[in-house]
Image (tube, grey):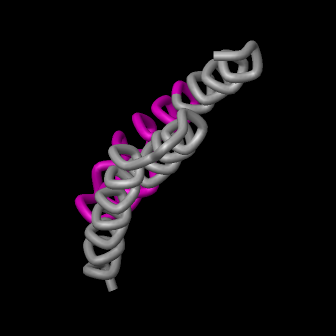
Amino acid sequence: MIEFFLIAATALGLCALVALLRLALGPTLPDRVVAVDTINTLVVSSMVALGVYFQHFIYVDVAIVYALLSFVSTLLFAKYLEAGA
């Protein structure tokens, strides 16, 4: 059962690579911002899954702080884009 979390973290990592491709190929700035936000969400999910797999719950605490910083940075990007980048 615990191996499920390692498989999930691996799948989330592969999804992050696909989002990284979108970040590189995105034709517009909003596409790239969405890709960065997606990568951040996948990283947070991976950190939680790896924290459960390795049974080191400090990863979950770090994931919560990272999610908060990611949310604030996404808000700042949105405000920047709204101002007319």
Q: Is residue 79 above or below residue 13?
A: above
Magenta segment includes 60: yes
Q: Main secondary structure of the magenta part?
A: helix
Q: Quadrant of the N terminus?
A: bottom left
Out of 55 and 7, give the one closest to the viewer: 7
Q: Quadrant of the C terminus?
A: top right
- For image coordinates 26% across by 69% down, the residue present is 10
Give residue 19's position: percent from left, percent from top. 40, 55
Count of numbered tags: 0
Residue furthest front as drawn: 27
- For image coordinates 49% across by 29% down, the residue present is 65
Give residue 68's position: percent from left, percent from top. 58, 30
Q: Quadrant of residue 24?
A: top left
Residue furthest bottom as drawn: 1
Q: Is residue 84 left or right of residue 59?
A: right
Magenta segment includes 10: no
Q: Is residue 6 left or right of residue 41?
A: left
Q: Is residue 31 above or below residue 17?
A: above
Q: Quadrant of residue 81?
A: top right
Q: Is residue 79 above or below residue 66?
A: above
Out of 4 and 83, give the one closest to the viewer: 83
Q: Which residues are magenta?
A: 44-69
- For image coordinates 35% across by 40% down, the residue present is 58
- For image coordinates 46% across by 32% down, the residue present is 66
Q: Quadrant of residue 53?
A: bottom left
